[in-house]
Amino acid sequence: MDECASLSAYASGAQFRASVAVTVRASPERALAAVRSVTLGDMPLARWMGEVRYLPGRLLGKPPASPQKNVPFLHQLEQSGTLVLKHTPEEMVTASAGKWHQVVDQEPVPFRTREEFEAFRDPEYEKLFIRLHAEPAGPGKSRLVLEHWTWALGPDAERKFARYWRVIRPTGNFVSKRMLRAAKRRAERMRA
């Protein structure tokens, strides 16, 4: 299966989808380069929301890895086992798997290769795909888009994630928008 067909298959299998976008006064390449450099320090409110989100785990002695404030957020995702499926100057697609519906321990599965990821089929888990892309939006502008879709691999996981999705979708969209706005600020500061 070629890369585009494979990504379409993932998207069509996902039961849960959302997207956010911003317009940036920069080229698509510069807009996407900026989003790749965004840190949690660029998004203090999103960082605080992450702290609140993972508070139950910390209180129960199962804290997630502590994110670093000044290291690019996408780099930290990659270091934690998120796989980059596609990376071009205009587009980046990541993939991960975990029990994303669990509040305390989401049991992320680290992957080294695309083949490992594609072979993973545990019905208790969900696969999460994030697509960041930038497209021309008029002279000197681009539209920076973050799409995410979640594919529950079994009926029980789908039921559990559906309950979680009702709560996390608005929060996830809010945090995603903060990330894109931080990238917009970075890209527009880079203007010559």
Image (cartoon, helix red, strand yellow):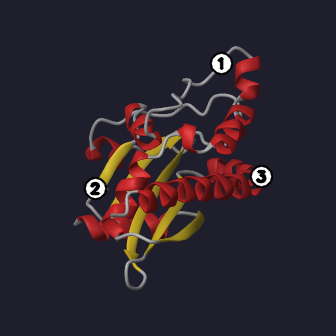
Q: Is disc 3 in contact with disc 1, using a CB cutoff of under 8 Å?
A: no
Q: Amino acid at mark 1?
A: Lys
> Can you name the residue that lies furthest to the front here?
192
Q: Nearer the viewer, mark 2 or mark 1?
A: 2
Is residue 131 visible in the rendered image? The answer is no
Q: Residue at x 44, y 33 (%)?
A: 71
- In the image, is residue 185 above or below residue 59? below
Which residue is denoted by mark 3 in the rendering? 167
Q: Residue at x 54, y 53 (%)?
A: 182
Q: Amino acid at mark 2?
A: His
Disc nearer the start of the sequence (3/2): 2
Which residue is denoted by mark 2 in the rendering? 87
Which residue is denoted by mark 1 in the rendering? 62
> Can you name the residue that lies furthest to the top here?
61
Q: Amino acid at mark 3?
A: Val
What whole-number distance in Å separates the C-alpha atoms at marks 3 and 1? 21 Å
In terms of depth relative to the viewer, which is nearer, 9 or 24? 24
> How would you rate the neighbour count of disc 3 (Cα within 10 Å): few for under 14, some for 14-19, many for 20 or more?
few
Seen in the image, is 84 located left or right of residue 25? left
Secondary structure at badge 3 equals helix
